[in-house]
Each structure stands twice: as C-alpha cells, then as structure tokens.
Amino acid sequence: MANAKLAGAKSLAHQMILVTGGAGFIGANFVLDWLARAGEPLVNLDKLTYAGNLTSLASIATDARHLFVRGDIGDAGLVRSLLERHRPRAIVNFAAETHVDRSIHGPGDFIQTNVVGTFALLDCIRAWWRELPPTARDAFRFLHVSTDEVYGSLGPGDPPFSETTAYAPNSPYAASKGSSDHLVRAYHHTYGLPTLTTNCSNNYGPRQFPEKLIPLMIVNALEGRPLPVYGDGRNVRDWLYVGDHASAVRTVLEKGRPGETYNVGGNAEMANIDVVRTICRVVHARRPELDCERLVTFVKDRPGHDRRYAIDASKIRRELGWTPSETFESGLRRTIDWYLDNGDWLASVQNAEYRKWVDLQYA
Ligand code: NAD
Ligand code: DAU
C-alpha cells in the first residue's frame, strides 16, 4: 500500500477501478470484497477524515493490487493526475461526510465534501472522459453511492421509497447527498457521462465507526455504558448488511444501465428500540455476564428526526437479479462477533476526538 505518494506511484495493471472513500466503513468492506472476488486492481482515494481508518485495510497492506492515495475528491489537480496515470475503467464514489448528527452540529463539511467535492470530482472526470477513445468512453462507468435519506420521511402506512419517489431531504446530510445526486444526474443528461446511482438504506457490519446506532450500541453494551435511544425509539429504518451492499454495488457497476438509479435495501424494517433490544440479546448470548437491557436510556430526540425509511428494491431485483443474502439476525450476529474479536480496531478508533464527539452529543 503506497501511502499518499502519488509521485512515486507506479501505474497498476491495465484494467483497474478507482474507489473514493475506501478507508471508510462501506468503502473498506467493498475494497476487501472486491480484491477477494474480482481480483482487479484498484486505486483507493481517501482523505482519512475521522471516519477513515487504514487499520480496516491492514489485511491488504502489502497487496500490490491496492494503491492507497491520501487525498480529497475536491482536489482537481490530484484527481486529474490519478485519472491520467491509471486510466480507470470505472469509478465508485463512496467518499462523503455521513453522520446525520454531525451534520446538525456543523453542516459546512457536508456541503464542502458532498456537494462541492462531488462537483469537482465529476467535472474532472468529464474533462478526462470526453478525450478517451470511443470504446473506452462507452465502457466507462461512474457509480455514485447515495442514500435513501434523500427521499425524506414516511408515515407508518406509506409505500416504501421507489426510484421515482420525489426527493424531500430533511437533514443537512440528506440535503447534501440529494444535491450530489442531482449533479450526477445532470452530468449524465447534459454531457452523456455514463453514471449510475445507488440509493441505499442503513448499513451495518464490521468496521463501522461507533457513532452510528448499531456499533455505538454494541460498544456501549460491552463497556456497560448507557444505550441512548432518541425520542420514543419507534423511528423505523431498513437495515442492510454491508457485505450485501458491496455485492449490490458490484452488480450495478457490471449490469446497471447508464443514467439509471437503483434503490438498495435489506428487507429488514425495524423500530430502533427493537434493534437495540436485539443487540442486547445477542451480546448477552455471547457474554452472559453482560445484561445490557437495563442500560437502555431514552434521551432527547434528534432535531428533525425522520420517522420511517423503507425501500422498494424491486427494480434492482427484477432488472439486475440482486437480492440481499443476510437476514438482520444473521448479519447482526456476524457484526457483534466481529466487534468482540477486534478489540484492537475498536481501541484505535476510540481516541480523544471520538470521546469529544460522544461528550458533545450525549453529555
Ligand atoms: P464513512 O463515514 O464510514 O466513510 C467515509 C469515507 O470517506 C472516510 O474514509 C473518509 O475519510 C472519506 N472522505 C470523507 N471526505 C472525503 C473527501 N473530501 N475526499 C476523500 N475522501 C473523503 O461512510 P460510509 O458509512 O462508509 O458511507 C459511504 C457512502 O455510502 C457515503 O456516500 C454515504 O452517504 C453512503 N451511504 C451510507 C449508508 C450507511 O448506512 N452508512 C447508507 C447509505 C448510503
Ligand atoms: O438511511 C441511510 C443512512 O443511514 C445513511 O445515509 C447515513 O450515512 C447513515 O448514517 C444512516 O443514517 P441514520 O441517521 O438513519 O443512522 P444512525 O445510525 O445515525 O441512526 C439510526 C437510527 O437510530 C435513527 O433513527 C437515529 C437513531 N439513533 C441513533 C444514534 C446514533 C438513536 O436512537 N440513538 C443514537 O445514539
């Protein structure tokens, strides 16, 4: 793994892809999965914000098929030189600021990376792509990884989000992701860039930073700390195991139709309080000395908290043949086992900056 040394980086093999945000939760799982399955080399461009973590990629530290470059998707000079040097056949854009609560405390970084950064990335790609020979231009794909939060909030009886549901983002995070989706759409319609967009529900699994609901609850349960449930705990999310998200992204990349968007979901709608209680049960089964249900604490609600998300994933199933393979129970057991077995990873992310965030959000 060559770290941030673009100048000295050698060009990789002929066919390769560029992944952005590949040191984050979903990106790192995708990169590991990609190298294990497809075997095709990749360049991994990541800024290494608080959410990026090279420890997640330790198992491929000496793998010559993985070239890590520390940098910003908004750095046009860097992106241009990566494109010219490596000539990727596809780009998968995971890079983003992603935590809703942080976007409420400080939306600026979200606008900078998710809107301005995605624009800069798209514009570099467009300028480089239009000069490619016709066959390479036609075969090229830009896959933008987005979220179901752009669709807003559902009532209990509403039909799930489909690809034609109108955008109605409610948090600064969701608005920034919605903006980036619109830019991607415009670059396809105006310039013909072969784009693909996926809008996915809540992910969980190994290597997720413990600020999001599931890893936060696991970590707090293991440490005997309160399990903070916002509001009445009846907000509903659809949960997708991260390995299934990686397989959905691979499928859309290979079979998706340029200009299309695909909703990705886990067929696992659950109220937050039920998620937390299930975590407590699995933790208790693994560590009988830990009785975490008594740690459940209802706390002040998130401002503008979306009540329910649900995904209609029939398009990706029908057109591309993708369905998730994990149930919530099987995925959660795998996830909790991973956290129990990877104390070093956990210790590496629970640094002073993390403690500061926890104090700010939950004090
Ligand atoms: P994450 O916060 O764990 O990781 C984000 C990664 O992007 C980090 O490695 C970070 O260093 C990197 N990054 C941030 N700003 C950057 C920049 N300007 N340039 C380069 N790299 C930068 O996020 P995640 O949960 O893995 O999410 C990945 C993508 O999937 C995001 O686009 C997110 O919106 C989307 N998504 C996430 C979920 C979920 O439940 N986590 C669900 C649906 C969609
Ligand atoms: O829906 C996809 C989105 O899922 C992604 O686009 C986002 O990047 C990702 O962060 C996630 O957003 P959510 O806001 O749904 O995830 P989070 O884990 O922050 O919260 C899940 C639910 O749990 C939500 O209803 C808020 C609640 N919650 C969360 C935390 C962190 C709590 O009750 N207590 C908490 O401490």
Image (cartoon, helix red, strand yellow):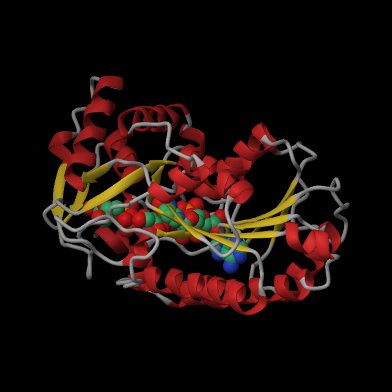
Q: Position of residue 329 (x, y in %)?
A: 30, 29
* Camera sees residue 352: no
Quarter occupied by residue 156: bottom left
Going 34% across and 40% down the picture, which residue do you hit?
219
The residue lying toward the viewer, choosing from 21 and 130, is 130
> Would residue 74 be found to the left or right of residue 362 on screen?
right
Going 78% across and 71% down the picture, which residue do you hit?
128
Going 52% across and 61% down the picture, which residue do you hit?
260
> Would residue 299 be found to the left or right of residue 88 on screen?
left
- The outermost residue toward the front is 318
Above or below 63: residue 334: above
Above or below 194: residue 221: above
* Camera sees residue 138: yes
The residue lying toward the viewer, choosing from 354 and 48, is 48
Going 57% across and 52% down the picture, which residue do you hit?
256
The residue lying toward the viewer, choosing from 199 and 77, is 199
